[in-house]
Image (tube, helix red, strand yellow):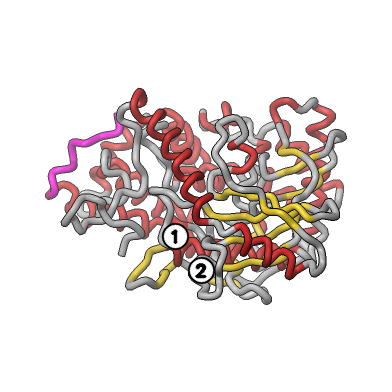
Amino acid sequence: MPLWHCSIEDCHNPSVRLTIVQDEEDYYPAYANAEQKEIETLGQKINNAALEAHAMALRPGILCHASPLRFDKHTKHEVMGGMNIHVNVEFQDGVTWLARIRRSNATSPPPVVRDYIILSEIATLQFLENVNVPTPRLLGYALETDKGNNVGVGYMLIEKLPGNPLDWARATEDQKHRIIDQLADHAIELSKHPLDKIGSFNRPGDEHIGPIAREEFSDVTDGAIHALGPFTSMQGYYIGYLHDILDRILTRQLYTHHPLDAYLIHRFLLDLTERVWPVEEENEKIYLNHADDKGDHVLVDDDYTITGIIDWEWAFSAPCALSFNSPLVLLDLGGFYAGDPAISLAESYFADALERKGGIELAESVRGGRKRRFFEFCCGYDMYTDWEGFKGLFEGLRRCVDVYGELEWEDWREIALERYEEDEGVLQLVVDGQEDVEVR
């Protein structure tokens, strides 16, 4: 069953999970208005007195004040991220906490999925309390569906760490090297805390690994969440994920503007899974992976000392080759999206730092990680809005695994149509009359 159904009256079809911008002139003003309405609506839902009461119960005898949530286009970036909104909870003695609240808008999943994701982040932060990496301390929480939650929304109370989000582009080479050395220390530390399965923490208070806590891995049936995982190998992880994508293409939840091309690509990626993630080469040890390490997850002070690693909501456990591949912030995006198999200078420095600190296996995950990174990005990529970027990634992947690496898109597509002409999904799309809808 889908996460969303069509909003048209009497239509029971699934809603499309990824939409596109048809009219930018109208879209962006409407988007800005929707953001304002979202913040104002959420602000009206939050019972600040109840939030303050919870915080003061955790610090008895110290008064606090929760800042009212109001829309301000000049400061919205300080309280609103892609998935969460933060409210300052300021105590009389100068201590400040954050109430971290999931955003609620037209693209948000149902409450049961939002609760599962927040539960996973809660359990992840608890795990990290025993790891020597600077992360916000969890102080309290309540789920959206909890009967005793009088605040009106699901939330967690966490420390507000000092520092500002890392601006990688503005950092000098020396400052970048300083950051990379610290990231290498964090990777070495995380490697001292192996886990037993591929998946997400999902039980606050223990280290149980359950299904993946991400919207694209989730469905809801009769009010209950059904998510993919846990897994014992990355091959199993991607086989499950790619089958799910193929099913959603056929049920018109994904890639509705170019279903046949998208199906051929992901059917081919399914065949490549064994080459990219051969089971016999996978390390048995599993480690926590941040999964959204673009740079703004790092807080730094004026000396470029890392003061915190934040935003762990998508974190999941994975083998060394994935968990300790280079952070996304270190990629040379121009070369990467052009399909260049070589790692960047920053990635190379990261690998050297890992090796110098004793993380030889971790360093090899970086130096040999390009094909896995290409593969990761190709799965579920937004091909409609960035077709040229996808072509570069797809060509880079095919060259790395030495399968049709010399072919241009049109030639590869012709071969893929022949290769999968008897595939049931391809036949269904052809029967449905969607074979002529292409990305180009």
Name the residue located 42 percent from the left edge and 47 percent from the top edge. Answer: 380
373 drawn magenta: no
437 drawn magenta: yes
Give the x, y percent position of residue 400: 52, 40
Give the x, y percent position of residue 109: 42, 57
**Residue 293, quarter of the rendered image:** top right
- Quadrant for the C terminus, please: top left
Name the residue located 69 percent from the left edge and 62 percent from the top edge. Answer: 125
- Nearer the observer, 9 or 184: 9
Tell me, for residue 211, which label it has, or none: 2
Residues under numbered marks 2 and 1 in contact, where contact means CB atoms less than 8 Å apart:
yes
Name the residue located 16 percent from the left edge and 56 percent from the top edge. Answer: 10
Residue for badge 1? 217
Note whether 196 is above or below 430 in the view shown: below
Q: Amino acid at mark 1?
A: Phe
Mark 2–mark 1 Cα distance, whole angstroms, equals 8 Å
Element on which disc 1 rests = helix
For the record, the magenta segment spans 432-440
Give the x, y percent position of residue 95: 81, 54
Q: Is residue 118 visible?
A: yes
- Which callout, 2 or 1, points at the residue further toward the start of the chain? 2
- Quadrant for the N terminus, please: bottom left
Q: Residues within 10 Å of mark 1 (few under 14, many from 20)?
A: some
Q: Amino acid at mark 2?
A: Pro
